[in-house]
Image (cartoon, rainbow, N blue to C red):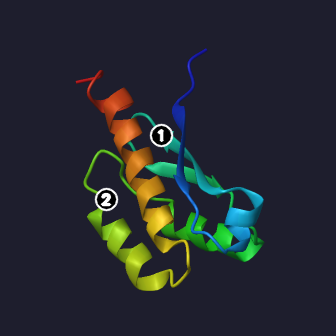
Amino acid sequence: MAMATAFITAYAKAPQNTPMYENNKQIGLMLEVNKQTHIVVNVDSTFMTDLAKDYLKRMIVGTDFSRDISALIDDVETNCVIPSQQALTVALKVAHQKYRDTFLKSHK
């Protein structure tokens, strides 16, 4: 039975001299996206604290991956004042592109 959602992962190198770099060397984002609506319905990450994971989840869930995600990137750049901000935006852009390449181009 085919799943109604897609599972997308993306990674970006974590900045050196941060706890995330010492533990994982990279930031990982795991996204569940509804393939019909293209809306992100669930998010997990390799961030170390539950608060960071919850904050990112609330920020990303509801994003339409069939559209441009510049507003989400702006939101991250404005509201996530963290050492790994740039890596987070890279991982989001990679996940978005993976989804578009896999689920939008092949299903038009």
x and y, in percent, of residue 19 in the image:
73, 72
The answer to whether mark 1 and mark 2 are in CB contact below 8 A is no
Quarter of the image that includes the N terminus: top right
106 relative position to 60: left or right: left
Question: Could you give the CA–CA distance between mark 1 and mark 2, rounded to whole angstroms?
Answer: 16 Å
Mark closest to the chain's N terminus, 1 or 2: 1
Label 1 sits on residue: 34
Residue that extends furthest to the left in the rendered view of this protein: 108
Q: Nearer the viewer, residue 78 or 5?
A: 78
Q: Amino acid at mark 2?
A: Ile
Residue that extends furthest to the top in the rendered view of this protein: 1
> Quarter of the image holding residue 43?
bottom right
Residue visible at 61% across and 74% down in the picture: 55
Task: Report crowding for label 1: few under 14, some 14 to 19, many 20 or more residues within 10 A (C-alpha).
Answer: some
Quarter of the image that includes the C terminus: top left
Q: SS at mark 2?
A: loop
Residue visible at 44% across and 69% down in the picture: 86
In the image, is residue 63 above or below residue 48?
above
x and y, in percent, of residue 94 in the image:
41, 47
Label 2 sits on residue: 69
Mark 1 against mark 2, which lies toward the viewer?
A: 2
In the image, is residue 108 above or below residue 23?
above
> Quarter of the image holding residue 13?
bottom right
In the image, is residue 33 above or below residue 43?
above
Task: Report crowding for label 2: few under 14, some 14 to 19, many 20 or more residues within 10 A (C-alpha).
Answer: some
x and y, in percent, of residue 78 in the image:
39, 84
51 relative position to 9: left or right: right
Disc count in the image?
2
Residue visible at 28% across and 64% down in the picture: 70
x and y, in percent, of residue 5 in the image:
53, 34
Q: Amino acid at mark 1?
A: Asn
